[in-house]
Image: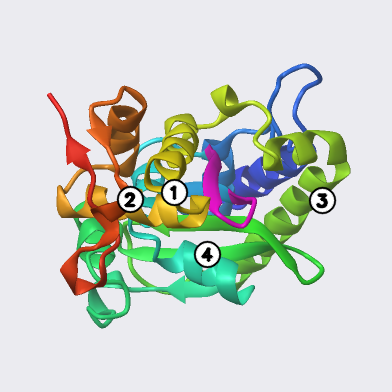
Amino acid sequence: MKGVAPTSDLAAVLGSLRPAPGSGGLVGADAGQCARALGVDGVAVSVTIGNVFNELLWATPGASTQLEDVQFTLGLGPGPEAAASGEAVTVPDLAREPGDRWPVLLSEALALGIGAVFTVPLRAGSVCLGTMTLQRARTGPLEESSLADAWLVARALTAVLMQDSGGWEAFAAADDDSYFYRAAVHQAAGMISVQADVTLAEALIRLRAHAFRHDRPVIEVAEDVVARRVHFRQDDGDEPGGWAGGGTEWP
């Protein structure tokens, strides 16, 4: 009866993806149950907001959440690659990937104990709403049945997001930053945009660059910007090496 638990888990996940009325969320179900059903150690779903931000929407705690944070800080990885291409990105053995594919991220992911990553896009026609990333410590390809189930969950998630058009539009418009996992990043990018007189996209690049140079999570730097402990000026992007960024740290 080994196949009963994953099968029942998948049915339960699919049956409870729609959030409970009044919950304030966009996705229901249990991320841990979804990971078990797909035969992986963790799962994370990130969605695109305004073609600038990626917001973590639904995830198992630990390595999956941390991997999403690293990808968000660096702006690269299987998630961003899948979102840009609209195609699945499968990496059955991270340790065997060329180091120049995702600089820094590969070593960070391995340090988290992640051996394999599988990302599928959340596609609505030609539009990619976000990505679902599966990870596990064990290396090797994802079983065909698990990959098929992953696509099934991804399509169901996309349908849930599209079905609640009012909630999705409010979320995508960032009407309530307090709901966001990365609320401070949204606020900080807006502040940097004003301080440095740049677009939101450029503000996010500068924020990421500052976090990378100081070896800090981008969320922590964002919190410092919001608390006015870090300030960005118009000339902070004039740095050698192609990294727009800067940021002056105040006491």
Label 4 sits on a secondary structure element that is strand
210 up-or-down from 62: above or below: below
Nearest to N terminus: mark 1 or mark 4: 4
Label 2 sits on a secondary structure element that is helix
In percent of the image, x 60 and y 33: which residue is there? Answer: 30
Q: Which mark is residue 197?
A: 1
Distance (Cα) linking label 2 and label 1: 6 Å
Q: Which residues are magenta?
A: 47-58
Query: Where is mark 2, residue-wise?
Result: 234
Nearest to N terminus: mark 2 or mark 1: 1
Query: Where is mark 4, residue-wise?
Result: 119
At label 2, the amino acid type is Gln
Label 1 sits on a secondary structure element that is loop
- Badge nearest the viewer, 1 or 3: 1
- Give the percent coordinates (x, y) of residue 205: 38, 57
At label 1, the amino acid type is Asp
Q: How is the image coloured?
A: rainbow
Query: Where is mark 3, residue-wise?
Result: 159
242 or 138, nearer to the observer: 242
Distance (Cα) linking label 1 and label 3: 38 Å
Residue 165 drawn in magenta = no
Mark 2–mark 3 CB contact (< 8 Å): no
Nearest to N terminus: mark 1 or mark 3: 3
Mark 2–mark 1 CB contact (< 8 Å): yes
